[in-house]
Image: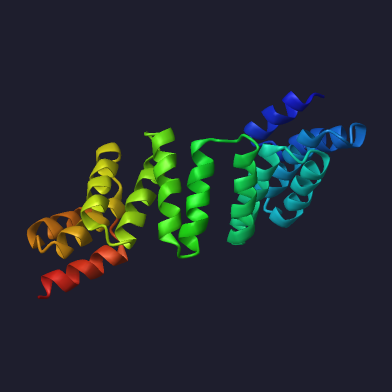
Amino acid sequence: MSMEQGIEYLQQGKLEEAATIFHDEIEKNPKNELAYVHFGHVLEISGNTEKAIVFYEKAIELNEAFATAYYALGNALFELEQYDDAERNFQLALKHGFDVSDIHFMIGLTYSYRGNDLMALPYFQRAVEMNEDDVESLFQYGLALAKLERVEEAMEVMHQVIEKDEEHADAYYNLGVGYAVLDEEEKALEMLHKAVKIQPNHLLAENALNLLEGE
């Protein structure tokens, strides 16, 4: 069976069938770097992320300019919370031509998760520029602005988030906090109540409401 059939099985969630095809391809063509990436992807979906990394690294060993393999390896390392190594591989994917919105988003996340919002900001901004419909990139961009205490800019972005997704509880929560910072208590309460209405167990919004309403 062909690699295309394996990809089709993968898309259908038929992991065993996909794994068999990719494994057979590796046996027949041990220098087919793409087969290693696909087999690694099956392993990762199956929860064997550390084993998947071995196959991604083998693909890179076969082709040091294989951007897709760097991207896959970056995602696997990110999943294991190895953010420094994840970022390094995302940067290599970018260097070798994988210049897509998601790469910038993931690099931004590696910085954000390491507490460096200033470095994260331009990557989230670039991700949004490349894909204006990506609500999560837009939200993370706004969140980075908020963490950098650029409150009004952050709120402008959060308003854009809820324009695109009216059910984005975290965006309403952040707007609530922003209005509270600006001493606009009525608007703050309105936003926080919306967050809790959308997500009844939103603890941060509930705590903020308790603080404001308890004053």
Residue 197 seen anywhere in this rendered image of the structure: no
Picture quarter with the C terminus: bottom left
x, y percent for residue 159:
23, 45
x, y percent for residue 137:
41, 44
Please report the residue visible at 41 percent of the width from the left and 58 percent of the height from the top.
118
Which of the 4 quarters of the picture holds residue 212?
A: bottom left
Q: Is residue 181 above or below residue 128?
A: below
Q: Is residue 52 above or below residue 177?
A: above
Q: Is residue 97 above or below residue 168?
A: above
Residue 180 seen anywhere in this rendered image of the structure: yes
The colouring scheme, among rainbow, by chain, secondary structure or one colour, is: rainbow
Which of the 4 quarters of the picture holds residue 135?
A: top left
Most distant residue in the bottom direction: 215
Please report the residue visible at 74 percent of the width from the left and 46 percent of the height from the top.
56
Please report the residue visible at 60 percent of the width from the left and 36 percent of the height from the top.
98
x, y percent for residue 206:
24, 66
Please report the residue visible at 11 percent of the width from the left and 70 percent of the height from the top.
213
In depth, the one of 71 and 22 nearer the eye is 71
x, y percent for residue 205:
25, 63
Q: Is residue 71 above or below residue 32?
A: below
Left or right of residue 86, residue 183 in this image: left
Picture quarter with the N terminus: top right
Left or right of residue 57, residue 140 in this image: left
